[in-house]
Amino acid sequence: MGRSGRDIGQELEEQLVDELILYLAPKLMGSDGRGLMGALGLTSMSDVIDLEIKDVRQVGVDIRIVAKPIIAKSIVTKPTVAKPIAANQ
């Protein structure tokens, strides 16, 4: 099932994605097109998600890439717990 970039970005951040299957079509598109990386909100190299390539093959004119996301533990945010504030007496 296809997903929107926003859904995938959230699922990647929450480490719910085991594998990505990406298709690369031999097309050039201007900057007005919405690419996968723009939809994920990745705007700088510090935001990148590394991929371990498992398989690459040609399917018709497209290239099919199977990859495993490698999410660094440092970018996964943990929920913060608010500490109670003591009342001044």
Image (spheres, grey):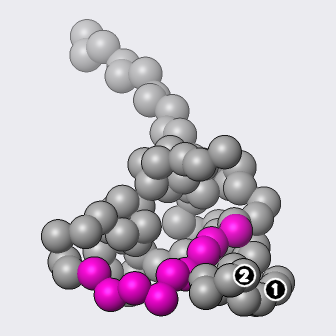
In magenta, the rendered stretch is: 21-29
**In the rendered image of this protein, does residue 59 appear above or below residue 80?**
below
- Is 88 placed left or right of 40 in the picture? left
Q: For the C terminus, give its image quadrant.
A: top left
| SS at mark 1 in the image | strand
Query: Residue 47's spot in the image, x, y percent?
Result: 41, 75
Say if the magenta span includes residue 39: no
- Is 17 placed left or right of 27 in the picture? right
Say if the magenta span includes residue 26: yes
**In the rendered image of this protein, does residue 9 appear above or below residue 72?**
above
Q: Amino acid at mark 2?
A: Val
Q: For the N terminus, give its image quadrant.
A: top right
| SS at mark 2 in the image | strand
User: Along the line of sight, which residue is nearer the eye, 36 or 27?
Assistant: 27
Q: Can residue 48 be spotted in the picture?
A: yes
Query: Residue 31's spot in the image, x, y percent?
Result: 19, 77
- Identify the residue at horizontal 81%, vertical 85% (top origin): 55
- Of badges 2 and 1, nearer the viewer stands 2
Residue carrying label 2: 59
- Identify the residue at horizontal 76%, vertical 65% (top origin): 19
- Identify the residue at horizontal 30%, vertical 64% (top origin): 34
- Is 68 placed left or right of 83 in the picture? right
Residue carrying label 1: 55
- Disc 2/disc 1 C-alpha distance (Å): 12 Å
Query: Residue 41's spot in the image, x, y percent?
Result: 34, 62
- Is 45 placed left or right of 14 in the picture? left
Q: Amino acid at mark 1?
A: Asp
User: Along the line of sight, which residue is nearer the eye, 14 or 24?
Assistant: 24
